[in-house]
Each structure stands twice: as structure tokens, then as C-alpha cells.
Image (spheres, rainbow, N blue to C red):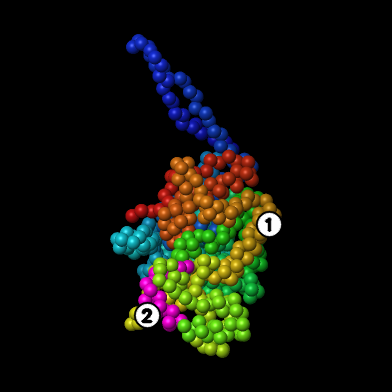
Amino acid sequence: MKKSIALLAILGLVFVSCSEDDAVIPPVVTPPTVDFTSGSANFSTYVAVGNSLTAGFSDNALFIDGQTASFPNMLASNFALVGGGSFSIPFMADNLGGATLGGVPILGNRLFLDFSTGSPLPTPVAGTGSTEISNILSGPFNNMGVPGARSYHLVAPGYGNVAGVQPGLANPFFARFASSPGTTVLADAAALAPTFFSLWIGSNDILGYATAGGSGEDHNETGNLDPATYAGNDITNANVFASVYDGLLQTLTANGADGVVANIPEVTSIPFFTTVPHNPVPLDAATAALLNGAYAAYNGGLAQLSGIALPAEEAEARMISFSAGETNAVVIIDEDLTDLTGINPALINMRQATAEDLVVLIARTFIGTLANPNDPTSINGVAVPLADQWVLTPEEQEAISNAITAYNQTIAALATQYDVALVDANAYLETVSQTGAPLADGSTVTSTFAVGGGFSLDGVHPSPRGYALLANLFVEAINTKYGSNLPGVNPLDFTGLYVE
């Protein structure tokens, strides 16, 4: 189907030398037209399936403005040019983002950049959110993005049961708009009989492990194929992911619907893992000397075991040393080091971080605090090593990368099998991280925390401008696959950072 859209033409007056009697007559310009077409796709009923990235989650919350700026809503505005129908969103009740269950707050408010202390700090907005989870919305809804959902959650009965929210058996976001307590996300999506769908799922299957500093289980190593036993910070087994993803596409395409799927970005390139340096500790000479004295026994014990119970290279890497300056590395626990506590209980698995380690964003307010408020020497990250949840070591990063590679191979293969468009979000967001994305006004969107314009203040989710860039990536893949010529959106129409 087609719709002719007249483009605005800028009419310039042509000035020529003339007498006072001469009239200046502007040339008659016939505005060109663009015939937008859907190609071979039918966008009349569009359903978006996914997690927080589909819902429009940003700044650590879901709120009305963020939902309005979700990439599916942007796609729906393009689809409307070629016959796309209405696009219903299960809006939160306000722009605070917080929510209650039975009047008790269970979800926090969105973040804003607070300058009141003189040092900009992401801070929750004040107030109590007016969204009550037990107030069930009447659907159906076209945006089926559920923050927190993993791949297997989309097919889990009861995932939207309000009664299961408090004990952690159900999702509070889905509970407020599920069609029934026992339904699934996929079932509610399929009930709309979509003619076109988007599916972007899988990031949470590794994100919990990553943001928890690798403190969970990697079920590609354990071989556990039962997601009912997985914890929130575990990595989903790649075979489980493949089976679930195949079932999702089988259902969504069952009635001949076309669609677009996106692969999983490397999460370690997002601001949550690239903002806090491994060496943020400033020390004067006296404090450095004091610390070196405190770690002398530990270093001596390593030296004694070097080449005996401990490879010499590892012994050297575990030595702890401070110096006067602004860039001392934090001390961390590394569970992948050789366990020496059976020989000497004082030789715990600790070392100083290197540039290959990734310190999580939330550690920025933890490093330098006191482990014991009554002991001024118990400085976290210096005298007291950072626990596993604060740092992603190279071994943990490898587990994440291996899982993402397996997931993306599955997504690519099934996109071909089910003949749907594929968005390479992984490659694109890597480009944003490495070189940035140029915009029409000459500016560049980057992944730099708070000021880059691509990510929100939680360091994980895109800003509205970041979502606009992703929407255009989806449009490009759709146009290529189905022969449409959708125009996309202008990222400059969307903010890079909400300002209070």
C-alpha cells in the first residue's frame, strides 16, 4: 500500500536588478512527492515482543515519557504511513517510574543528574510513584516489552500473576497488563494475530550475571538445562535459549506474519562497565607506604610459594603495591586465582585490578567507603578487597562473550529459517562505543556515561536518542528485507538526557 507525502520545499526569492516598476515573481516550484510503501510486508497489526529494551526502559525505570520514546513506538509511527494500525502501550501511571504493590513501594523512581552537591550524581527523583501493580490494565497491548524478562520468561505461565510478584515468582511489569494470571507473554502477543512483529530478547539471559560482577552460575559450564532452577544472576544455557527462541518464532510466524529480530550486543561495552576505571584511588606518599607495609606479609607469602605451589607469573600478578599518585588500582577478590588458603589462610584470592578488569558502575559510590564505620583504615577497594560482584574479570567476560556468540548464532540461523529481517545490534552498538554515531547537525552520539547522548543514567539502557538510532537500524533492516522505504525517525527530535 502507498501513501503520497508532499515534502516541504524551501522557496528562495531570486533577486535581480530591476526598476521600481518591476515585480519580483518567485518561480513556481512543484513540491516533489515521496511515495512510502510497505513493500511485501503488512504492518496493519504490529506487535513488539521483548524485554526492557522493547518497553522503553531508561534511567533505571519505566515511565510514560520513556515508553512513548520506545523504539517500537517509533516504528509504529513509520508503519502508520503505510497502513499500520494503532499501537497500544501499557503506560505506567506517571513519569516517576516507581510502583507499589498493595501500597508498598517495590519499584524505584527514575534517575536524574543531581548537581546540588557540586559533583553530578545520578539520583532518584523524589516522590512516590502512583503506579499500583495490582491495578490491572485492560488490553490488548501491542507493546509486549517486559522489563526484566529473559527468553524463557516469555513462555512461562504465571509470569504475570499478581499473586506471584511479592514472592518473586512473577514479573511486576507484566502482572499489571497480563490478560489473565496464568497467561504467557507470548500467548498475549499471539492473541493479537499480528501481521508484523519485532522480537528482541536475550540480553537479560546474560545481563544479570554481568551486572552482578560474574557472581552467578554459567549454565553453559554447569550444563543445567532447567531454567526453573536458574537464579537471576545466572547465564542461560545456550541450548535452552535456542529451544525457546525457536518456539517464539514458530508461534509469531504461525499465521504468516512477517517480522524483524535483533541480536544481542556485547554488554561489556556499555557505560555500566566502562565508566569506573580500574585505578581510581588517590594516595599520598605516607598512606601508600602504610598500605605497602600492611600488605608486606601477603606479598612475602606469595614470594615463598612462587614456583612451588604457585606459578611464578601468577605470584607476580598477585603482588599488591601502592604509590603516591592519583591512579592506584583497587584491590579485588578473584575466584579464578589459585586457592592457597589451605597452605596459608591469610593468602586469600586477591590481587589488584588491571585495565582488563571491568569495574561496575555502581562501585563508584562504594570504593573508598568504610567496611567498618568504626575503623578508618577499613577502606573498601584499598585495605578491604572488592568482592566478586563489583568487578568483571577477564574470565567472567569470556563466559559472557561465549554465551552472546552462541545466542547470536542461534538468532541469525533462525532469522534465516523463518525468513525474517535481522538487525545486527551487536555490531552497531560496538560502533557507537568505539567511534560514535554522527548526526545531521554535526554532533556525535557516543556511549560516554551521562554526556554521550546514547545511554541513560543507569548505564545499561539507551536514552531516547539512543532508542531513535536503534529504531532507524530496525527500519533499515525492514526496508532491505521487505522492499519498503520507511523514512525512519530523526534522532535529534529525541533527547539524549532528561534534564530536571
Q: Is residue 16 left or right of residue 480?
A: left
Which residue appears at 66% of the width and 56% of the height?
Answer: 412
Q: Looking at the figure, which quarter contains the N terminus?
A: top right
**Mark 2: amino acid:** Thr
**Mark 1: amino acid:** Ala
Q: Which of the two discs, 1 and 2, sits closer to the camera? A: 2
Mark 1: few/some/many CA within 10 Å (<14, 14-19, 20+):
few
Could you say which quadrant of the image residue 338 lies in?
bottom right
**Residue 126 locus on image (x, y percent):** 32, 62
The residue pinned by badge 1 equals: 413
**Residue 65 locus on image (x, y percent):** 41, 53
The residue pinned by badge 2 equals: 377
Which residue appears at 60% of the width and 64% of the height?
Answer: 401
Earlier in the chain: of badge 1 and badge 2, it is: 2
Residues shaded magenta: 278-295
State the SS at label 2.
Answer: loop
Q: Is residue 339 visible?
A: yes
Q: Is residue 231 left or right of residue 27?
A: right
